[in-house]
Structures are given as C-alpha cells and as structure tokens.
Image: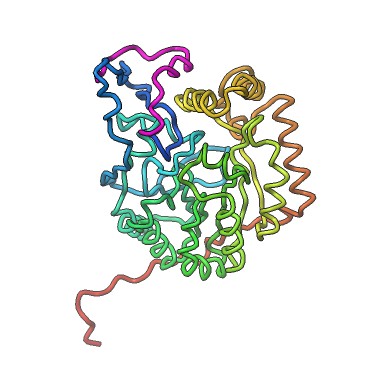
Amino acid sequence: MSVSARVAPVDPLAYAGHRIDPERRRGRGATINPGGRFEAEQRISEDDGWGSLGELPAFRTEVAVEKPRTIITKNDSPDISFDRSINPYRGCEHGCVYCFARPSHAYLGLSPGLDFESRLTAKPDAALLLEKELSAPSYQPRTIAIGTNTDAYQPIEKKLRIMRQILEVLARFNHPVGIVTKSALVQRDIDILAPMAAKGLAKVAISITTLDPKVARGMEPRAASPAKRLETVKALSDAGIPVTVLVAPIIPAINEHEIERILDAAKAAGAREAGYVLLRLPLEVKDLVQDWLLTHHPDKLRHVVSLIRSTRGGKDYDAAWGQRQVGSGPYAWMIGRRFEMAAERLGFNGTRTRLRNDLFVKPEKEKAQLSLF
C-alpha cells in the first residue's frame, strides 16, 4: 500500500474512486476521509498492487484529553435562542453524515470525514471549570445550551460521565439548562433533570430525523434508533421534563415525506414543542453528503442536490443570518408551511417553555477551619 499526496479535487464526486472500504468504516456515517480545508494536500491510500490495502485496520474510536482554560462558549448569533453553550466533547461518534459541526475538526488538523466520528477529544475537567466560572462575582445566569455542536450523550459519555458531572454542578447552582440530543442515554440523568425541571430549570430536545430504522442506520449509524428516541421522549415527558422534538435536518427527497409522521409520533410520546432545520451544507459537509448520497442513494443524487440548491439561492449553502436554518425559495417555503400546519394541527408550540434565571445561587464554599463562634 502506498500513500500519495495530491491536490484536493474540485469536483466532490472525484472522491468516489477513493471511498474508504466498507469493512474499514463499518458502523460509520461518512464514506470518505478527506483532509480539512487548512491542509495543502490530500493524502489518499492506494493499492500498490501487492494486496496490502486490504490489511489496513478498521476505524476505531480514539479519545484524546483536552485541557481548555474555560468551558462556557459565548455567541451572539441571531439565529439561535441562547447566548452560551457547553461542549464536553469534540467530534461525535454518532456519525451523522450531515452534521454541520464536522468542519470544526479541521481546526484540529483532522478530517471532517471519518476522523470526526472516530478521533474524538474529551474535556474531563469540564465540571470543575464550570463551577469556577459560575462562581465568578460577575457571572449573570442565562440558559446554557448543551449538545449544540456535538452530542454530549454520545457513546463515550456512558463511561466518561462528563455530562452527568456538568449537570450535578448546574443543579447545585440552580442554573437553567437546555439539552439537545439523539441519544437514549439522557434517560440515565432523569434523576437530576426531573427535580431541575420541577423548578423550571431544565428542558430537553430530542432530534428525530426519520422513523425508518434502515435510513437512520445509514445516515446516523451510532445514534439511538428512531424507536429508542420516541421511547426517550416518553420517559422524559413522564418524568415531568419538558420535551421538544426537532425534525432536523430535513433532507429534500430523503426524509421530507416523514415530517407529519414524525410529529404525530412525537406528540403521542409526550413532546410539547417542535422545531425543524433544513439541511445545511457548510464547507466540507457538502462533499461528505454528496458522496454519501452517491453510495446510499445514487439514483437520487442529482435530484437531491438540485432541490438543496433551490433552497440556497442556487448555491450549496447560504450562511446568511435568517437563512441558514430554513433556507429560501418556493421549496423551502413549502417545507416550512407543511411543518407549521402539522405542528398547529397537533397543538405543538401553544406555549413555549421559558426557563428561570431567578433561582440561581452560588453555594458557599466549605471553610478550611470550623468557626469558634
């Protein structure tokens, strides 16, 4: 086997000849592993005729430790309802091929493709950093969003328990938190979330992209199955935790026909609110999704790409404020109206859950020496 360096192809379909062998990427979402946008060259494994290519190892999950100085990330985006978030991990083992966070792996010198879902970083000091930041005299509480970039309940959380430690800190401070996840593992933390929700301090959004287990397995291979996600909606709702269902992302000609069915099922499971996001293809995600379509839905590739571009002003992506989440044009308008009509019919979004900031308290630190009086 030889490794050659070459300039990245302009045509994403040029990657088709360099698709990673299915056995090497079994259980993964991306079909290719191109270098990030900061790399001057692409390194591609090629069989040199000696048959050594078949001996390459499968992509296994590796976790590196990250030591950040702060854990709360601030933003001022008008497209989202929160101004601060926490991401306990970089990369996500769920392997959702469409994930808009994939390009962030390029900052680590890694691929937004298979590296994103197999070479992860964890922040084990997250809870300690959070306690320090919440204790700062100048800190003013507002809802912290978790799961906005990568899923805090991805498989490695079961062992590392970083998210649970974060929740324990937030509960102690009476700090509001909103969680977005595709994982059934969030049920593990109902014992923390339910008391917080009873005070108006917690809500959870479950992302459901499809009800078809075969489609889900192909595009989000290590996330919970659709049935498990609906089960999670019910478990959280039964525990008194407000649940939102996110039909996200809506992929033209792939899962858009399921909008109404997903909302019906989520409502029956106990979800109170609903939202949607139209497929986003920033930076390297465009190439990854197109090659995934070529692998799993070759007959739909050109049709899907054409529809996506019709919602983004003729481009693969439009990053303009107000357009990123919902797109524009007649097709995007139709998707939006279908969602709104179905949500209204089912009684979603009649009232919005607003979390409380006024209960925030900074616990007193234990004194090193007992007082004599």
Q: Is 11 inside the magenta-drawn segment?
A: yes
Which residue occupies 32% across, 58% down? 132
Which quadrant does the N terminus fall into?
top left
Q: Is residue 105 above or below residue 339?
A: above
Residue 242, position in %: x, y? Answer: 61, 61
| Observer-nearest of 288 and 318 | 288
Q: Is residue 364 above or below residue 126?
A: below
In the picture, measured across the screen, residue 372 lies left or right of residue 243, that is left
Q: Residue furthest left?
A: 369
Which quadrant does the C terminus fall into?
bottom left
In the picture, measured across the screen, residue 351 lies left or right of residue 181, that is right
What segment carries the magenta color? 1-24
| Observer-nearest of 130 and 97 | 97
Residue 323, position in %: x, y? Answer: 62, 30
Which residue occupies 41% across, 68% down? 172
Residue 355, position in %: x, y? Answer: 57, 59
Which residue occupies 28% across, 14% down? 5
| Observer-nearest of 334 and 13 | 13
Which residue occupies 74% across, 48% down? 343
Residue 57, position in %: x, y? Answer: 28, 34
- Would residue 99 be visible to someone looking at this image? yes
Q: Is 367 inside the magenta-drawn segment?
A: no
- Would residue 181 be visible to someone looking at this image? no
In the picture, measured across the screen, residue 251 lies left or right of residue 137, that is right
